[in-house]
Amino acid sequence: MTDVQTPEPISLPADSDGWTRFVTERPDARLAEARRLLAALKDGSARSAAETLEVWNDLSAALASVQSEGSLLSECHPDAAVRDAAEEHYVAGSGMAAELTIDRDLWDVLSALDPAGLNANQTRLLEHSLRDLKLGGVDLDEDGRARAKDLARRDTELSMEFSRNIREGRREMRVTPEQLAGLPQDFLDEHPLDDDGLMTVTTEYPDLMPIREYATNRDTRIAMSELQGDIAWPANDAVLEELLSVRRERALLLGFGDWADVETATRMARSSAGVAAFLNQVDEASAAAAEPEYDQLLARLREDVPDAEAVTTADLAYLLGALKRERYEVDSQEVRSYFLFPNVLGGVLDVTARLLGVAYEPVDVPAWHEDVRSYDVHFGGERIGRIHLDLHPREGKYNHAACFDLATGMAGRELPQGALLCNFSRGTMEHDQVTTFLHEFGHLVHAIVGGHQRFIAQSGIATEWDFVEAPSQMLEEWAWDADVLATFARNAVGEPIPAALVQRMRVADGFGRATLVRRQLGLAQVSYRLHADVPADITAATTELLQASSRVRSLPNNHFACGFGHLTGYGACYYTYQWSLVIARDLLTGFDADLMAPEPAARYRDRVLAPGGTRDAADLIEDFLGRPSGFDAYRGWLSEG
């Protein structure tokens, strides 16, 4: 973090007129400021290299503000008009950012700078800026630059449309109480009977996940999974087809073999071939362990459905839960009784505060919805950021779980602010929702703790994209520690979760691990291969890739790719989840047996999170572990099953 005093946080509007201005006048002013700064950069004035980089940083900050605020509010504001205006300005900001990457005059200014006398961060900023301009097509001829500009703008438009169709693609079905046999009582209580004696359930996660895990009626699980499989279909069919085509053309125009080559030019994998090699490594590490798991899953399914030919995606969560309950005495309904949402919220705040040496102070400030809880984050008596937690589902809101920047911090200029958009139950949570909460909170604290650099391009979560998930995946481990859970996991009468139950949960979690990794491998292959191969039949190719990675079958006529939201932001690089997990399992070795030990926790905070993007991820890892990252911890974790 920094000794430079931080400014006041952004104040959000308190009424509808204020929100309209916030998503129109504010970004318009920032875009105008960015255009003024661009003109100043190119006006021929005599500036030192350091002074030029300061102007470039100011321009980048103005655009980042437009994009961060637009991206967040387009996904969460309850007013559709505000969401639409936020999305429009996000596209405008992204469009200008893309234009900069083909601006020859800007290139001439930055490439002419003499790096002599620049410090390490200034030199890094200059080198990365020139690299990114080249990746945008700045060194193409005039026609090529014009085409690159059009393609980048179209990529942004299509990505936003793809995400919007998923966000607004909520499906529902009406069922009898008998069709929901096996569901917890609190779930049934939250879904009262309509006048015709039926219940309405939706594809939102608080309905989808419990039905997949608890419904003993296989037809119900299949019906719900079929609805989920058709999220944003058929609307996203044509959108995705064009998006893949646009990205293929961009890659070829820039002189790359495929879109993964473009995306990994700034990442740890370095190339499309690097992605393919890594996925092969995951394949080899997980294949053998997954085979006996699948045989046991199929045998358990046949106890309920004797003529079942294969385990499907509609069966997997249910069967894993059944086997863990029967074999390991881990009843997920018993487990969830210890995870009451208010306690989990307090626990996540308390655990991360103690771990990182920070404090969270609730603040009563305006936000976009009454559900939002806001906190100022303090370190060493100084406010270092503000977080906003929007944790329950509603219509028109982002329907998964993710962390968004509201403001990327800069030392002395901008206080970092972030938001979690999640869809948790207001009552009892599943344990995997607790791990999800910790995961996303890991991104949030990374953005706050690392959000105090001089340059915005190096602040917050600004490391290589295939490292970004590692701190969050590592933090999931705290949801499996008996001592940690005992501090907040309590049932309705206040009894803490028994340590023996947590131990059984840990053992049970090993079963099915390789199967779930194979599923993740399939998703990574879909992400990578759709971009590398650009198949004519996306649905058929997706099904083939998923089935080549896992014996767990996709449901027939499934349109999974249309609802695979990671195809926009992650593009060809969903592999990053497993890449980061390899790193996360290795980082955990630095904590030994005590996850709350203050010395490694402080060292992790200061050496991995606080530097933001001022150093390469490999250097951050080596600084913390005292050695380069390796694959052994991940391989050992897989073998625990």
Image (cartoon, rainbow, N blue to C red):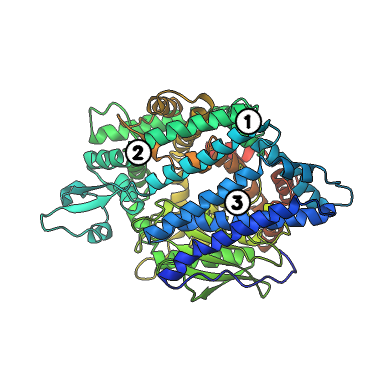
Image point 67% across, 51% down: which residue?
A: 590
Residue tagged by mark 3? 471
Q: Measured from the top left, where is residue 285 in percent x and y? A: 55, 30
Real-space CA distance between mark 3 and mark 2, rounded to the nearest whole angstrom: 35 Å
Task: Tell us which disc is closer to us: 2 or 1.
Answer: 1
Task: Tell us which disc is closer to us: 1 or 3.
Answer: 1
Relative vertical location of residue 286 with respect to residue 53 in this rendering, above or below? above
Report which quarter residue 356 is drawn in. Answer: bottom right
* Residue 566 visible within the image: no
Q: Amino acid at mark 3?
A: Pro
Residue tagged by mark 2? 235
Mark found first going from the N terminus, 1 or 3: 1
Left/right of residue 218 with respect to residue 543 in the rendered view: left
Q: Amino acid at mark 1?
A: Asp
Image point 66% across, 35% down: which residue?
A: 137
Contact (CB < 8 A) between labels 1 and 3? no
Task: Name the mark on residue 237.
Answer: none
Mark found first going from the N terminus, 3 or 2: 2
Mark found first going from the N terminus, 2 or 1: 1
Task: Name the mark on residue 143.
Answer: 1
Left/right of residue 274 with respect to residue 167 in the rendered view: right
Q: Measured from the top left, where is residue 343 in percent x and y? A: 43, 67
Real-space CA distance between mark 2 and mark 1, rounded to the nearest whole angstrom: 32 Å
**Crowd tier of the residue under label 1, counting other residues whose Cα lies within 10 Å: few below 14, some 14–19, many 20 or above:** few
Which residue occupies the extreme right position in the image? Answer: 116
Image point 33% across, 54% down: which residue?
A: 333
Q: Measured from the top left, where is residue 349 in percent x and y? A: 52, 66
Q: Measured from the top left, where is residue 208 in percent x and y? A: 32, 48
**Crowd tier of the residue under label 3, counting other residues whose Cα lies within 10 Å: few below 14, some 14–19, many 20 or above:** many
* Residue 55 visible within the image: yes
Q: Amino acid at mark 2?
A: Ala
Q: Which quadrant does the N terminus fall into?
A: bottom right
